[in-house]
Amino acid sequence: MDRNSSRHSESAARPEDLLKTFGASVFVLLVGLGVIFDATDRGSGFTTEALRRTEVAREPRQIPNFLLLDLDGKKDSLRRRLAADNRVRIIDFIYMRCRSVCSSLGSVYQQLQQRILERGLQGQVSLLSISFDPAHDDAAALQDYAARMRLSPAVWEAVSLASASDRQRLLDSFGIMVVPAPMGGFEHNAALHIVDARARLVRITDYDALDQALDAALAAKR
């Protein structure tokens, strides 16, 4: 055998080496899949939003207390407001200058308000819109929003945070993501949050899933 043939034999991959390489690749793939499986809550959610909803549905989340400002300029705590009449709240998060997703949420809440009134459920379920932009959304802005959206006070309330220092804590407690947008606005995720009288976030639904949100609120009331 000449030297060239010898070098060729040495450089050629042996079957056992190929098998080892294949085995190592499979191991790395399985480890990677395991990490993804664990990170996505055993495969049940592949986005932060899906995971947020799955976790809340499995284990209700206690909401911290916050001081709120209403359209009359009065301040009240979130927990006291929730416990006052023992109703379940369907909560959304908006800011009054918004003309995009917040307008869609406003339309959804108008429809929910109508359904609650038609079914006589205002003693069990109510709507609460919370502004995360206290720097701009004072009592006057809340009054303007209430008039524009035709809020029925027995069913739907609009409030703002009384203190801007609570803003991030509020967003974090509900899992709301807000980022600055052009022209001084915000981009944020939109959903309907079902909160019981004990200040527990028990379900999160799509913002246009009216029947699902209402059913979840009634279930939480029971």
Image (spheres, rainbow, N blue to C red):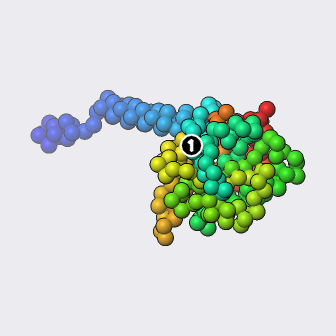
The spot of residue 39 in percent (x, y) is 48, 36
Given residues 173 and 30, the one toward you in this image is 173
Q: Which residue is mark 1?
A: 66
Q: Is residue 181 visible?
A: yes
Q: Is residue 48 visible?
A: no
Quadrant of the frame with the C terminus: top right
Asked if 180 appears above or below 12 in the picture, the reply is below
The spot of residue 209 in percent (x, y) is 73, 51
Residue furthest left as drawn: 3
Q: Report which quarter residue 201 is drawn in.
A: top right
Quadrant of the frame with the N terminus: top left
Given residues 135 and 9, the one toward you in this image is 135
Numbered label tally: 1
Q: Report which quarter residue 197 is drawn in.
A: top right
The spot of residue 85 in percent (x, y) is 75, 39
Name the residue located 11 percent from the left edge and 40 percent from the top edge.
Answer: 3
Q: Report which quarter residue 174 is drawn in.
A: top right
Residue type beneath disc 1: Phe
Asked if 164 appears above or below 81 in the picture, the reply is below
Name the residue located 66 percent from the left edge and 45 percent from the top edge.
Answer: 193
Name the residue located 70 percent from the left edge and 36 percent from the top edge.
Answer: 83
Name the residue located 56 percent from the left edge and 43 percent from the top edge.
Answer: 66
In the image, taking residue 206 as reference, residue 218 lies left or right, namely right
